[in-house]
Image (cartoon, rainbow, N blue to C red):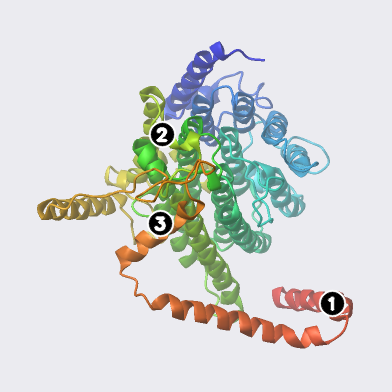
């Protein structure tokens, strides 16, 4: 076992890797590396192209923050993104094994290891599946190599989906139980970077078969929308903070699958501007997801060290007990929730622009699936925001419920400083999204298969988020300035009125009579939690007193309608047994209708 004294050495090593990767991303050193005589002999072991260096920089950042806990996963992730076909697959399998949780069900991750093995066979020379590929894996040569392009186009998305399923925490299960939803750790962020890197490789190396590419693109869109909704539901029903974050992380990890599907549709319909927007969105999503989740997990680690186990039923009043850490956590959660001007809103804006840039066939049958995907995404995003409100209302508001939670306070300044650095990096990426796109400019050109690179960026593009149509533009700095101006005006008016802000005291008694000695934490009836946050929102919005009555009546009517619709089936004896025999014919009929429609 590695000694704790090795932590500074590990961090120094990851710092050296970050500096070396930044230097290698410059055109001069990278050209010298590619022109070196030894590069061709080591191409099966290492693959130092711009796309690999972009992912390696983020893996080094995760390793710098993870310390001993994620050292194995981050080291394997570094080889998975920077290795050749064989080394990358073996290291990716090691990442999947390192990410396996002891509480997970048996056999979880086996499909990911099989997917990595299949990817190794597809990308390596020989193997009977793919013909020999040139020594340096050229995406254009790979996409047009031989007559096996059709079989490769059929198998490659399946292999990447199998490999990235455990890396990105993808799951159809909507529950938040311990067996189905593991606690989020820093090593999972390294797996997220590897998964995004694999989807970028797929977009770069997919064969030029328009019909197959379009079919797979729309299939990935529908798949990602369902996975995003399931992850949002997991976040809404989870019982502790780490599993809530794990559900939110699963929603973020489903977005690369969706963006890759949009890229395949753009390539099939020969839309280079939309493809450039897809590549920029995927690169920005990989960087923003890595930085934001590294900052959030660092904050959660510091909070868990001070307040104990982060079970939602035991938390409360952290905004009063540890205000500095709560402010940083709120900023990170706002970035995850997609509120402007943070990076989550920029990514949501790019997704909407990409959906708007999809080709329109003019028929209703072509538009209905896209509309359904957007409806599912809208519902899932709303559920995601509800999960965030629940987390903030229970953990930060209310009052503490355990002695350990009541004694929590802000951590020491060295720990708080590392948390501040992570949140500041997330804010910098939010305000300067173009800076990261300038750094990964060569990798974007490689994925888009443009020998001369994408459109050059000027100084103004550092503050702007690109759009696939080339007309509209989003500048997050404008939203930040507007927020600061409005906030400053509200603060000035508040100060001029002389109203002092009142906040809830983090104690168990607030003017209540003394409690008996057998109730050490006070009267259970006074242990309010998330209801305080809901009442504060109602008071701020000026919610009328009688409006809740009509809402309850509408809910009762909705439930009554559901019962009346199911009532005829209940009157028939053995209704489930009788309907079970019709399930297979109905399923076959639906499948035949879909096949006829698709053909």
Q: Is residue 473 left or right of residue 229?
A: left
Q: Quadrant of residue 433?
A: top left
Task: State the quadrant of the C terminus.
Answer: bottom right
Q: Quadrant of residue 34?
A: top right
The image shows residue 242 at horizontal and vertical percentages of 56, 42
| Front residue (pair 172, 267) | 172
Res 300 seen here: no
Q: Which mark is residue 532?
A: 3
Res 162 seen here: yes
Label total for image = 3
Name the secondary structure under disc 3.
Answer: helix
In the displayed structure, 61 sits above or below 262; it is: above
Rendered residue at 47%/40% (across/down): 287
The image shows residue 349 at horizontal and vertical percentages of 41, 58
Nearer to us: label 3 or label 2: 3
The image shows residue 322 at horizontal and vertical percentages of 38, 36
- Mark 1 lies on residue: 576
The image shows residue 424 at horizontal and vertical percentages of 35, 36
Rendered residue at 52%/73% (across/down): 360
In the displayed structure, 334 sits above or below 53; it is: below
Name the secondary structure under disc 1.
Answer: helix
Q: Is residue 119 left or right of residue 80?
A: right
In the displayed structure, 72 sits above or below 443; it is: above
- Alpha carbon distance from label 3 to label 2: 30 Å
Nearer to us: label 1 or label 3: 3
Disc with the residue nearer the chain's start (3 vs 2) = 2
- Mark 2 lies on residue: 422
């Amino acid at each position: 076992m590695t000694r704790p004294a090795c932590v500074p050495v590990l961090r120094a090593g990851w710092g050296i890797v970050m500096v070396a990767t930044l230097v290698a991303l410059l055109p001069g050193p990278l050209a010298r590396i590619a022109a070196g005589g030894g590069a061709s002999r080591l191409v099966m072991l290492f693959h130092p192209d711009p796309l690999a260096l972009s992912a390696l920089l983020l893996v080094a950042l995760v390793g710098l923050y993870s310390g001993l806990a994620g050292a194995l996963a981050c080291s394997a992730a570094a080889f998975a993104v920077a290795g050749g076909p064989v080394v990358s697959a073996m290291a990716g399998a090691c990442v999947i094994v390192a990410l396996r949780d002891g509480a997970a069900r048996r056999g979880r991750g086996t499909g990911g290891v099989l997917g990595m093995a299949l990817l190794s066979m597809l990308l390596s020379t020989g193997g009977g599946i793919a013909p020999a590929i040139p020594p340096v894996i050229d995406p254009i040569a790979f996409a047009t190599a031989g007559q096996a392009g059709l079989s490769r186009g059929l198998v490659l998305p399946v292999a990447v989906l199998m490999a990235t399923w455990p890396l990105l925490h993808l799951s159809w299960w909507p529950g938040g139980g311990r067996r189905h939803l593991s606690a989020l750790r820093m090593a999972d962020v390294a797996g997220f970077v590897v998964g995004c890197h694999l989807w970028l490789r797929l977009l770069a190396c997919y064969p030029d078969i328009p019909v197959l590419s379009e079919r797979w693109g729309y299939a990935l869109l529908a798949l990602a929308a369902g996975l995003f909704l399931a992850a949002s539901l997991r976040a809404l029903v989870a019982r502790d903070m780490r599993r809530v974050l794990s559900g939110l992380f699963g929603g973020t990890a489903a977005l690369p699958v969706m963006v890759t599907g949009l890229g395949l549709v753009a390539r099939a319909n020969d839309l280079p501007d939309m493809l450039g927007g897809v590549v920029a969105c995927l690169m920005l999503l990989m960087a923003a997801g890595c930085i934001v989740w590294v900052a959030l997990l660092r904050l959660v680690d510091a909070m868990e060290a001070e307040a104990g186990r982060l079970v939602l039923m035991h938390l409360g009043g952290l905004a009063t007990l540890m205000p500095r850490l709560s402010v940083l956590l709120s900023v990170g959660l706002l970035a995850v929730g997609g509120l402007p001007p943070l990076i989550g809103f920029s990514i949501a804006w790019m997704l909407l622009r990409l959906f708007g840039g999809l080709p329109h066939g003019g028929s209703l049958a072509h538009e209905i699936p896209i509309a359904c995907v957007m409806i599912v995404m809208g519902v899932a995003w709303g559920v995601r925001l509800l999960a965030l409100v629940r987390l903030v209302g229970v953990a930060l508001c209310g009052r503490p419920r355990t002695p350990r939670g009541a004694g929590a306070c802000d951590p020491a300044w060295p720990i708080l400083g590392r948390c501040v650095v992570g949140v500041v990096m997330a804010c910098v990426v939010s305000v300067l999204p173009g800076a990261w796109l300038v750094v990964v400019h060569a990798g974007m050109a490689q994925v888009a298969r443009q020998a001369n690179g994408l459109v050059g960026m000027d100084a103004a593009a550092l503050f702007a988020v690109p759009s696939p149509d080339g007309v509209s533009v989003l500048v997050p700095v404008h939203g930040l300035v507007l927020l600061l101006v409005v906030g400053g005006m509200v603060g000035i008016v508040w100060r001029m009125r002389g109203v002092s802000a009142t906040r809830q005291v983090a104690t168990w008694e607030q003017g209540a009579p003394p409690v008996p000695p057998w109730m050490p934490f006070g009267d259970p009836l006074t242990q309010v939690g998330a209801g305080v946050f809901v009442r504060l929102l109602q008071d701020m919005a000026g919610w009328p007193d009688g409006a809740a009555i009509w809402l309850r009546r509408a809910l009762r009517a909705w439930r009554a309608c559901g019962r009346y619709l199911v009532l005829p089936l209940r009157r028939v004896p053995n209704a489930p047994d009788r309907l079970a025999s019709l399930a297979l014919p109905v399923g076959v009929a639906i499948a035949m209708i879909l096949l006829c429609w698709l053909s």
